[in-house]
Image: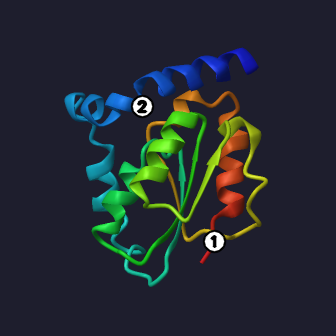
C-alpha cells in the first residue's frame, strides 16, 4: 500500500503546476455541484470545513465566494499540492498525509462540513476513510 501511496503522491506532485488547467480542460463538474449542494449549511458564520484531497484549494476558494468567514483545514497526500494551497492562502491548517492514515489530527465532531471531491478513488479502505470523515463531522 505504501507503494500505491507513493505513486499517487508523485502523480499529484507532477500535476500540481498545471492542476487548474487540467481540471478546467476536463470539464470537471465537482466544484459546481458542491456550490449548488451546500446552501443549507454554508451561511453559518465561521463554518468549519475539512477538505479531503484539497489539492491547491479550489473547493475552499469556491466555498469562500458563498461564505468568506469559513475556517478551513485541508488534507492532501501531495507536498506540492499542499505548497500550492499554502500559497493560495485559503486554509487555516494544511496537513500532508494519505487519507488511508486516518484523521487522527482531529477530535470527534470538529467540522461542520467535510468535503471529499475527486480523491476517494485513491483511498484503499473507503469504509475507514468515510468512517473517519463521519467521526470528525458534527451531527446536528
Image location (x, y in percent) of residue 17: 37, 30
92 w.r.t. 123: above or below? below
Judge whether residue 114 can be spotted in this image.
yes
Circle 1 SS class: loop
Image location (x, y in percent) of residue 76: 57, 41
Q: For residue 66, which quarter of the picture?
A: bottom left
The residue shown at (35%, 58%) is: 61
Image location (x, y in percent) of residue 100: 71, 36
80 w.r.t. 86: above or below? above
Q: Which residue is mark 1?
A: 138
Q: Circle 2: is it few (<14), some (14-19), or many (20+) Cα within 10 Å? A: many
Q: Is residue 46 left or right of residue 138?
A: left
- Alpha carbon of mark 2 to alpha carbon of mark 1: how far? 31 Å
Is 126 in front, or is 47? Answer: 47
Q: Which residue is mark 2?
A: 16
The residue shown at (51%, 35%) is: 80
Q: For residue 133, which quarter of the picture?
A: bottom right
Q: For residue 10, which quarter of the picture?
A: top right
Amino acid at each position: 500500500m505504501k507503494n500505491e501511496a507513493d505513486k499517487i503522491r508523485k502523480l499529484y506532485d507532477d500535476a500540481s503546476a498545471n492542476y487548474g488547467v487540467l481540471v478546467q480542460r476536463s470539464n470537471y463538474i465537482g466544484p459546481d455541484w458542491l456550490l449548488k449542494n451546500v446552501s443549507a449549511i454554508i451561511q453559518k458564520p465561521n463554518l468549519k470545513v475539512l477538505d479531503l484531497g484539497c489539492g491547491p484549494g479550489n473547493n475552499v476558494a469556491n466555498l469562500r465566494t458563498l461564505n468568506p468567514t469559513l475556517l478551513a483545514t485541508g488534507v492532501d497526500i501531495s507536498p506540492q499540492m499542499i505548497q500550492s494551497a499554502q500559497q493560495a492562502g485559503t486554509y487555516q491548517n494544511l496537513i500532508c498525509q494519505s487519507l488511508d492514515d486516518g484523521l487522527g489530527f482531529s477530535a470527534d465532531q470538529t467540522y461542520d462540513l467535510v468535503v471529499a471531491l475527486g480523491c476517494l478513488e485513491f483511498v484503499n479502505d473507503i469504509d475507514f476513510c468515510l468512517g473517519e470523515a463521519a467521526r470528525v463531522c458534527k451531527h446536528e
